[in-house]
Image: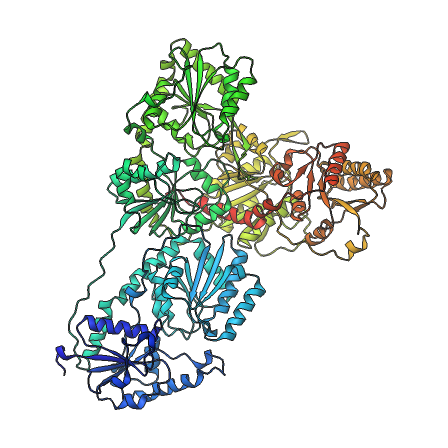
């Protein structure tokens, strides 16, 4: 037995290389021993220059100089005889030997591997004991006959202080969702399998993706196979093979990735798995039969029982979709890493050696002091008058005042930004918060534009106080929110609803905004510009905004000009700031010039300090905000704190505090949003200038009678009380902290609703086709389809189809109810058409569903009243039943306004039609035999029905054909199963004959497959949709035309409003107008306008959005 003070433990390996796994383990062991006061050196056969002086040559080893020699073994050892002769206790540290079967048979490493295994079998006869660095390696030794009493598992590999991030890695630019694998390029690491899975993921994913494969090529031929497969799959832009990288680069790659994925078939330990966990990366790994992965990860990773690419891709997709699951994995990883603390490793080694009477000194390792950290870090602009900057700094101040340590970090959507030094001098509290910007934060809250949610680095990552002003968000934003945030707090219920209606599935909480910051500053009129038209003798109307188009200044001026003239004692004060996105001076000048007697206007186009703005609020008699869209409407809340009456649009984010009891609400109509986003399905609120003029008249009458104070008192008092109570920054901070706490306890997986759909299916019906295109991409057969039983089927039913109702006007839908009840669905998507159902039976179905807690969404393809025989059918007859639906999906603004007029505004959702995503097939035999080569082909497409305008198009073509012998008309118009369609086909043939167009018109009335239809349409130079007047809200046929990429011409009807940005409108619906419009376009060279539109509205994107909406609706607000 050796005295503790004399303990010496050395190590030996045949070679030592910087960055090598075994070498790193030896360096760690030496560090532990030396820190405990134990003499320890590392020896090898011949030290490389890079380690000379630190690692000693075996020739310098003095036999008997150590109590124990740890012999590291991972391959054949050529100095076995020397080792055997040494007198000290000898312990093998077994690092696993890669099975030879995992290398090519001709690889030069094969003899060394075989030799290594032979030594493992032979050495047990002369070793004192053996240490395995992993559970699998321990089991391998025991299987080979090693004595369990002298063999132990001690993972002397993991130096957490070395592999933890060297510094905080900031990535202030957007980047793709990034997958990472680190390991040598060799077959058993299975990078090729990961490439295959990644290719499948790219095809199914809605988000930008990147894959990094890091590691040197041990088997160059395998690397060539990987590169060749990447090229074959066409994914070279998304996959990077980095080769071997230095520690700094590796550190950066770990820090800027989102998920570590290993499909390796063999890992003796799997050191990169530990490195990934130490960098906060969630880990997904294949639990291969010959791998130690399960023991390395413990419960800290997600394990796959197969490496089949489709399973791997689906699992990665789930991890992308569920940030709460990824967060859970990283939390378990942090717990797992404690098992590799210096103290834990040293104590295990000490206990093991004590069994051989080698007593290591007791030692307590110093723990790394925790880095200074904060509870919350707010990231975004904060040092200017920009509205987002105001929100960020005021929330930071409020959080700090609540006792939650807070930091402010300056960054914007496109990248980092500098902080104004003068702002920090003027605002020492913000300077103090900014000084903590780089400290780790438990919660990271961001507000910036455009929104960027990558690399937030918090335990809970929050898009904070988010605002939006129109009904449609870019789907890229929504996918980013879903995949990277644990919580979104919004500034209003309108924004929360809008997020949900766009398919944002992240937990949502409405926290509002504060307005009380303005009260901190004393009123100061000295900074106000001169306003000669403002006096006590005038009614003073105030408007404060950016004057962007959505702020409705044009509506305000129109109403103001309708209500007043220059002779009346009124003045409109418009306060804005210089900005290239408005031309308010010219706008006011043009407005005044258009009137015979324009009332007075004062313009303030400059930033004002808060004290001056307070003075302006105090001078005014009423604030007017006829906005088309507001996320919140901060000037309105500020005005209320100054007891200023508010007139504003009756919908939008301001409705949280602008109610009939606190403000005067302007009536509005839905209108397509005219913004830079150009989203076809986006709407905002068009305030009524006439109603606003009427309200202004009421205010003027009360003012002129000296009764304005009494006229406004009740609402002004209620408004002030409401804002003072609910819309303070302290209230926002409390609500934010409460939402963050609840977000910690969200389910790991977002709940997918059990969906049923009531629709026609597998029949020659536009709605049947619509339903299949809508549901199949995102739901497949995971939807229970309740289909009609009286349709002529054009395809066989799959097991998820149940036919249980009869289309028409006489089914009471009792069979449908019974089928729904048996199915256990909790969400119903119902396709409504007046010809499908009896109104009362359908209303009864909705009421029955709601009573059972089934959430319903109804898709309307037309909402206008219709006459059936002598009976009026109107949606107003089931208004109360529709009121209980979760959402009413429509395709046009006209439908939205019609339902609003019925009192159904709260659950309306403009939902886009999709478009087929296709590559045009090559012309087939039928097309080649048609003899159309060299012709200029004008085509049309869709069922042959009266409102589609085919006779009118034939007449228009007759006019065009007279002057152009190359023109040919191609009508791909299948007969609908209705006698009127057959009659129309005969009419078309007669028109062709009457206009002497035989040989110049091809009329195809057979029902064709999609591929056949596209083969014909692909021959066209332009496609025309000559619809006549119709009550339909949208056209499925026009989307088929757009999908071809050919120029599309449409008659100027509302049915095409949702594709307005993708088509060219003809000047009218009559034959002459159509002929004139087509001739003009052909003369100038027809242009296809639908490129961007097709990218946004492919059926896959629309289907995924619907799936996400259903998930979002199933979740309650936090």
Residue 970 location (% of width, % of height): 77, 46
- Quadrant of the drawing holding the N terminus: bottom left
Identify which residue, 601 or 309, lies in the foreground. 601
Rendered residue at 38%/15% (across/down): 711
> 486 and 277: which one is in front?
277
Q: Is residue 904 above or below residue 776?
A: above
Left or right, 28 with reference to 504: left
Q: In which quarter of the image is the C terminus?
A: top left
Whether residue 952 is situated above or below residue 1001 in the rendered picture: above
Closer-to-camera residue (899/667): 667
User: Percent from the top left, x then y, of residue 416?
Assistant: 39, 47
Instruction: Using residue 674 as the reference point, say whether residue 377 is left or right of it.
Output: left
Front one among 499 and 535: 535
Q: Where does the image place residue 780, in percent across and percent down from the top left? A: 55, 54
The image shows residue 346, relative to residue 578, as above or below, that is below
Can residue 406 be seen? yes
Residue placed at 40% from the left, 19% from the top?
Answer: 622
Name the spot of residue 530 as percent of width and height, x first. 39, 18
Q: Which residue is drawn at 28% across and 88% down?
A: 83
- Answer yes or no: is residue 914 visible: no
């Amino acid at each position: 037995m050796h005295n503790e003070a004399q303990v010496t433990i050395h190590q030996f390996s045949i070679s030592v290389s910087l960055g090598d796994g075994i070498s790193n383990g030896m360096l760690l062991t030496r560090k532990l021993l030396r820190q405990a006061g134990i003499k320890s050196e590392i020896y090898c056969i011949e030290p490389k220059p890079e380690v000379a002086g630190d690692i000693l040559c075996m020739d310098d080893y003095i036999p008997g100089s150590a109590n124990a020699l740890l012999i590291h073994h991972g391959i054949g050892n050529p100095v076995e005889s020397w080792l055997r002769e040494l007198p000290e206790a000898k312990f093998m540290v077994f690092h696993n030997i890669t099975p030879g079967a995992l290398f090519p048979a001709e690889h030069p490493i094969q003899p060394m591997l075989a030799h290594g295994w032979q030594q493992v079998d032979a050495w047990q006869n002369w070793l004192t004991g053996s240490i395995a660095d992993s559970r699998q390696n321990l089991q391998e030794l025991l299987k080979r006959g090693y004595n369990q009493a002298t063999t132990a598992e001690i993972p002397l590999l993991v130096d957490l202080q070395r592999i933890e991030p060297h510094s905080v890695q900031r990535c202030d630019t957007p980047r793709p969702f990034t997958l990472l694998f680190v390991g040598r390029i060799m077959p058993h690491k299975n990078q090729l399998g990961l490439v295959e899975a990644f290719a499948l993921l790219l095809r199914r994913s809605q988000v930008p993706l990147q894959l990094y494969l890091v590691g040197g090529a041990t088997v160059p031929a395998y690397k060539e196979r990987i590169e060749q497969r990447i090229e074959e799959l066409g994914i070279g832009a998304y996959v990077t093979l980095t080769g071997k990288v230095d520690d700094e680069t590796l550190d950066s790659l770990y820090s800027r990735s989102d998920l570590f994925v290993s499909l390796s078939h063999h890992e003796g330990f799997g050191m990169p798995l530990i490195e990934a966990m130490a960098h906060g990366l969630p880990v997904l790994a294949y639990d291969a039969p010959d791998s130690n992965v399960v023991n390395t990860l413990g419960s800290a990773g997600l394990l796959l029982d197969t490496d089949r690419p489709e399973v791997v891709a689906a699992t990665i997709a789930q991890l992308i979709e569920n940030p709460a699951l990824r967060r859970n994995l990283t939390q378990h990883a942090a717990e797992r890493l404690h098992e590799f603390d210096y103290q834990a490793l040293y104590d295990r080694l000490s206990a093991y050696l004590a069994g051989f009477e080698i007593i290591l000194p007791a030692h307590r390792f110093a723990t790394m002091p925790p880095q200074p950290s904060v509870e919350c870090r707010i990231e975004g602009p904060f040092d200017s008058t920009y509205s987002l900057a105001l929100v960020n700094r005021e929330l930071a101040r409020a959080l700090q005042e609540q006792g939650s340590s807070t930091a402010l970090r300056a960054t914007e959507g496109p990248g980092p930004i500098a902080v104004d030094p003068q702002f920090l001098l003027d605002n020492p509290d913000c300077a103090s918060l900014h000084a903590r910007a780089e400290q780790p934060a438990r919660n990271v809250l961001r507000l910036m534009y455009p929104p960027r949610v990558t690399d937030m680095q918090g335990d809970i990552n929050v898009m904070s106080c988010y605002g939006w002003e129109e009904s449609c968000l870019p789907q890229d934003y929504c996918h980013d929110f879903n995949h990277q945030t644990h919580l979104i707090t919004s500034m209003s219920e309108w924004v929360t609803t809008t997020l949900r209606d766009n398919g944002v599935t992240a937990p949502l909480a409405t926290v509002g905004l504060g307005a009380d910051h303005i009260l901190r500053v004393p009123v100061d009129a000295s900074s106000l510009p001169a306003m000669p038209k403002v006096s006590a003798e005038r009614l003073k109307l105030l408007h404060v905004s950016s004057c962007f188009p959505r702020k409705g200044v044009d509506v305000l001026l129109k109403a103001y000009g309708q209500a007043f003239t220059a002779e009346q004692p009124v003045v409109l004060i418009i306060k804005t700031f210089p900005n290239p996105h408005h031309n308010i001076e010219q706008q006011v000048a043009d407005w005044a010039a258009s009137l015979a007697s324009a009332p007075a206007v004062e313009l303030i186009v400059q930033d004002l300090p808060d004290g001056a703005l307070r003075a302006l609020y105090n001078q005014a008699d009423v604030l007017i905000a006829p906005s088309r869209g507001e996320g919140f409407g901060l000037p309105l809340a500020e005005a209320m704190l100054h007891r200023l009456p508010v007139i504003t649009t009756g919908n939008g984010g301001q409705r949280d505090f602008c109610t009939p009891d606190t403000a005067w609400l302007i009536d509005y109509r839905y209108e397509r949003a005219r913004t830079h986003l150009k989203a076809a399905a986006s709407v905002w609120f068009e305030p009524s200038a006439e109603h606003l003029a009427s309200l202004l008249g009421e205010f003027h009458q009360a003012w002129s009678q000296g009764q304005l104070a009494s006229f406004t008192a009740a609402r002004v008092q209620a408004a002030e009380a409401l804002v003072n109570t609910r819309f303070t920054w302290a209230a926002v901070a409390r609500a934010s902290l409460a939402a963050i706490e609840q977000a910690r306890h969200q389910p790991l997986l977002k709940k997918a609703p059990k969906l049923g759909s009531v629709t026609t299916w597998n029949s020659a019906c536009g709605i049947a086709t619509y339903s299949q295109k809508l549901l199949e991409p995102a739901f497949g057969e995971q939807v229970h389809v309740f289909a009609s039983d009286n349709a002529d089927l054009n395809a066989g039913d799959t097991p998820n189809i149940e036919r249980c109702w009869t289309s028409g006007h006489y089914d009471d839908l009792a069979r449908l109810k019974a089928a729904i009840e048996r199915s256990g669905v909790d969400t119903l998507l119902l396709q409504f058409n007046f010809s499908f159902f009896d109104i009362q039976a359908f209303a009864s179905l909705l009421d029955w569903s709601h009573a059972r807690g089934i959430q319903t969404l109804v898709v309307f393809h037309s909402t206008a009243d219709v006459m059936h025989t002598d009976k009026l059918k109107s949606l107003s007859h089931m208004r109360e039943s529709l009121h209980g639906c979760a959402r009413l999906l429509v395709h046009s603004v006209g439908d939205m306004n019609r339902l609003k007029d019925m009192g159904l505004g709260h659950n309306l959702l403009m939902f886009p039609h999709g478009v087929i995503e296709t590559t045009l097939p090559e012309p087939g035999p039928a097309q080649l035999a048609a003899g159309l080569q060299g012709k200029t082909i004008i085509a049309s497409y869709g069922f042959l029905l009266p409102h589609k305008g085919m006779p009118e198009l034939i007449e228009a073509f007759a006019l065009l054909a007279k002057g152009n012998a190359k023109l040919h008309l191609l009508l791909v118009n299948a007969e609908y199963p209705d006698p009127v369609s057959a009659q129309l086909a005969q009419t078309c043939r007669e028109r062709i004959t009457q206009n002497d167009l035989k040989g110049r018109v091809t009329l195809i009335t057979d029902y064709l497959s999609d591929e056949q239809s596209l083969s014909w349409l692909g021959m066209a130079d332009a496609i025309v949709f000559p619809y006549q007047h119709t009550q339909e809200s949208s056209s499925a046929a026009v989307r088929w035309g757009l999908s071809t990429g050919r120029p599309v011409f449409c008659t100027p009807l509302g049915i095409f409003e949702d594709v307005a940005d993708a088509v060219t409108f003809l000047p009218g619906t009559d034959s002459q107008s159509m002929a004139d419009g087509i001739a003009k376009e052909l003369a100038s060279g027809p242009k296809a306008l639908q490129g961007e539109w097709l990218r946004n509205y492919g059926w896959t994107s629309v289907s995924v959005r619907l799936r996400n909406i259903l998930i979002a609706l199933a979740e309650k607000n936090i």
